[in-house]
Every structure is written in structure tokens, then in C-alpha cells.
Image (tube, grey):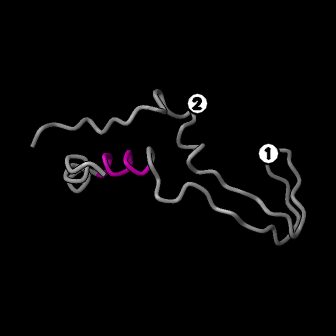
Amino acid sequence: MHGLAARRSERDPEAFREVLRYDMPTQFLRRTVVSGIEVGGKKFAPGQGVLFLSASGNRDDREFANPNTFDVRLMPD
């Protein structure tokens, strides 16, 4: 993380959240389905692997006005 962003994130929780949204330390998680379930019209069977792509969700233009822009509104210290 850039030094200015690091100092700003210590003072401003919103800046810290933006750092995590833009470049999460964990880009995905894999899990194994334990019991059958349906999510969003998709059926998942026991033993099936599923992948949660948090990085993809954090760049969703339905949720974020400019998803590919890193903006913590840094001001010079």
C-alpha cells in the first residue's frame, strides 16, 4: 500500500475500506458444499466445489460508481 494511503487509512475507516475493496489480500475463497442448496436459481450438490470471487464483486458497476478507480480522497499530510 502506498505510504499516503496507509497513513490516511489509519485515521479514516472509509479509506481503509476502499483499500480493501480495491485490492483485497484474499481474491477468492473455495468451499465444498456440505448439503444441497439452491442460490440465485443455481443448485449445488454435496461435495461440489464452489468459488467465491470477492475481487470480482468489489468491481461490480451495479454497486460502485467507478469500480476500477482507486479513490480514498487523499490529501497531502
Secondary structure mostly seen in magenta is helix
Q: Classify mark 1: residues with Cα within 10 Å, few (<14), some (14-19) or many (20+).
A: few
Q: Is residue 5 above or below residue 65?
A: below
Q: Which residue is mark 2?
A: 62
Q: Is residue 49 above or below residue 38?
A: below
Residue 27, horizontal then vertical, whole percent: 55, 54
Q: Which residue is mark 1?
A: 40
The label number, if any, that marks residue 9 in the structure image: none
- Position of the C terminus, as image quadrant, is top left
Q: Is residue 35 magenta?
A: no
Q: Is residue 17 left or right of residue 9?
A: right
Q: Is residue 36 left or right of residue 4?
A: right
Q: Is residue 16 magenta?
A: yes
Residue at (89, 53) in percent of width and height: 43
Helix, strand or loop at disc 2?
Answer: loop
Residue 25, horizontal then vertical, whole percent: 46, 58
Residue 28, horizontal then vertical, whole percent: 61, 57
- The region drawn magenta spans 13-20
Image-quadrant location for residue 75? top left
